[in-house]
Image (cartoon, helix red, strand yellow):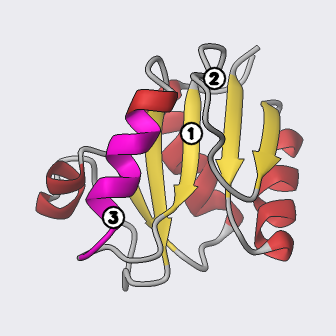
């Protein structure tokens, strides 16, 4: 079973994203912030990017070090729409996908399926 970790400061949003992904068959863990130790058993990290132009790159770099085997989907309120993986912003941040927040359930699930595949 594919494992996703959701890192989101807002408890309500974290709960909602977690529920949507679990309903689609993924194993999901969630937390309000990144820890300090390396995590090797996560297939996908969904992480809130609070400050895209400023701290976004730093956040993604840290996530890639702590979750070396995981694909990364960034979510942000600073996006007007979800962006394709080949968008200039996604490439600049080194994320597999950028999803606008708030997003619909289907927008999130489509981004996850496109990134790591459907839950089995």
Q: Give the x, y percent position of residue 23.
A: 88, 44
Q: Position of 2 compared to 49: left or right?
A: right
Q: Secondary structure at mark 2?
A: loop
Q: Give the x, y percent position of residue 96.
A: 34, 41
The residue indicated by pointer 1 is: 45
Tell me the tag on residue 119. none
Q: Quadrant of the C terminus?
A: top right
Label 1, label 3: how far apart the Cα atoms are: 14 Å
Please give the range of residues in magenta.
54-64
Residue 17: name its quadrant. Answer: bottom right
The residue indicated by pointer 3 is: 56
Q: Give the x, y percent position of residue 76.
A: 47, 73
Residue at the spot x=64%, y=59% of the render? 106
Is residue 52 or residue 82 the one in the foreground? 52
Residue at the spot x=23%, y=76% of the render? 53
Residue at the spot x=47%, y=75% of the render? 50
Up/down of 37 relative to 74, above or below = above
Please indicate, yes or no, whether residue 79 appears anywhere in the rendered image.
Answer: yes
The verdict on residue 66 being magenta is no
Q: Quadrant of the N terminus?
A: top right
Compare marks 3 and 2 and give the one earlier in the sequence: 2
Q: Crowding at label 2, few (<14), some or many (≥20) Cα neighbours within 10 Å?
A: some
Name the chief secondary structure element in magenta: helix
Label 2, label 1: how far apart the Cα atoms are: 7 Å
Answer whether labels 2 and 1 touch (C-beta < 8 Å): yes
Tell me the tag on residue 42. 2
């Amino acid at each position: 079973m594919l494992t996703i970790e959701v890192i989101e400061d807002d408890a309500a949003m974290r709960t909602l994203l977690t529920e949507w992904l679990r309903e689609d068959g993924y194993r999901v863990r969630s937390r309000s912030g990144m820890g300090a130790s390396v995590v090797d058993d996560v297939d996908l990290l969904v992480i809130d990017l609070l400050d895209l132009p400023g701290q976004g790159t730093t956040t993604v770099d840290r996530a890639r070090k702590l979750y070396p085997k995981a694909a990364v989907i960034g979510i942000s309120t600073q996006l007007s729409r979800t962006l394709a993986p080949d968008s200039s912003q996604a490439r600049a941040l080194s994320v597999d996908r950028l999803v606008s927040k708030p997003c619909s359930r289907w927008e999130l699930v489509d981004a996850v399926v496109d990134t790591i595949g459907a839950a089995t």
